[in-house]
Amino acid sequence: MCSHKILYTIGFLLLLSCKEKKQEVVQIKKTKSDTSVAYSIQENDTLQQSKDFISIKSDPSKAIREEKTYPSDLEGEWAVNCGNGLTTFSIGKEENIISLYGNSIYINVEVEKLTDGEYILKFKKIATQENWVEESLKITESDISKDKIIGKFFIKKDRKVELQWIGLYNIKKQKLEFVGNDFLLIKENGGKTPLILEPCH
């Protein structure tokens, strides 16, 4: 009788042990599967971030969120040095002009308001382009995007302007132009960005 009980007990323990091992195997498989899925998700996120970064790097205007804008009510004139009347950023009731390259190339821009004191700039048309400008710098108006943001600026409490310049996007060449020291205001600012422009009036 005792031997039957012992055998029954041993059999029950073995059965219990097998169940526990099966559960461990299932748990291990599940953990591996979960890890694989988590890794796959992480890998996809990293890949998407890389794509987003490459996209922004090739077209920095994408770094600025597309937000609802309003007509600008801003007026004034700003410059790195107000003593130099040729290189200014001028916003008026009828037109807004930026000196792009010395006294040789001026462009009209659209100024759109995001919030109080925060604005974006878009290319509108060429205001002036002198014949003596070297060929590599000349703008063909139809090649420049009028939808891409070329800059963003903030009006500070002291009425100074902080300008984050991006550059003109050439649709034909699929690249930004007038970036860095090719944009005169940055050159006048010693190559430093963002630009801090003084109010001239």
Image: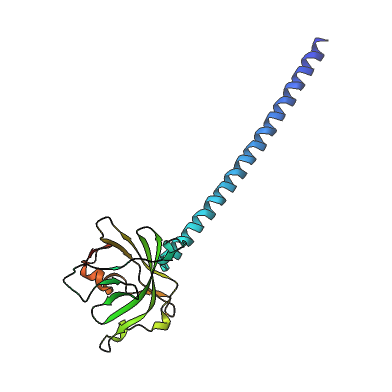
**Above or below, comparing residue 55 to residue 169 in the picture:** above
**Above or below, comparing residue 49 to residue 165 in the picture:** above
Tell which residue pokes out farthest to the top in this image.
2
Tell which residue pokes out farthest to the bottom in this image.
131
Foreground residue among 69 and 63: 69
Q: How many marks?
A: 0
Residue at the spot x=51%, y=58% of the render?
A: 48
| Res. 194 in view | no
Residue at the spot x=67%, y=37% of the render?
A: 26
**In the picture provided, is 113 more to the left or to the right than 45?**
left
Residue 120 lies, in percent from the top left, at 38, 65
Residue 137: quarter of image: bottom left
**Above or below, comparing residue 166 to residue 170 in the picture:** above
| Res. 135 in view | yes
Tell which residue pokes out farthest to the right in this image.
1
Residue 14 lies, in percent from the top left, at 73, 24
Tell which residue pokes out farthest to the left in this image.
83
User: Which quarter of the image is occupied by the C terminus?
Assistant: bottom left
Residue 55 lies, in percent from the top left, at 45, 65
**In the picture provided, is 52 more to the left or to the right than 118?**
right
Residue at the spot x=30%, y=83% of the render?
A: 128
Residue at the spot x=48%, y=62% of the render?
A: 51
Residue 118 lies, in percent from the top left, at 36, 60
**In the picture provided, is 42 more to the left or to the right than 130?**
right
Foreground residue among 132 and 22: 132
Foreground residue among 50 and 80: 80
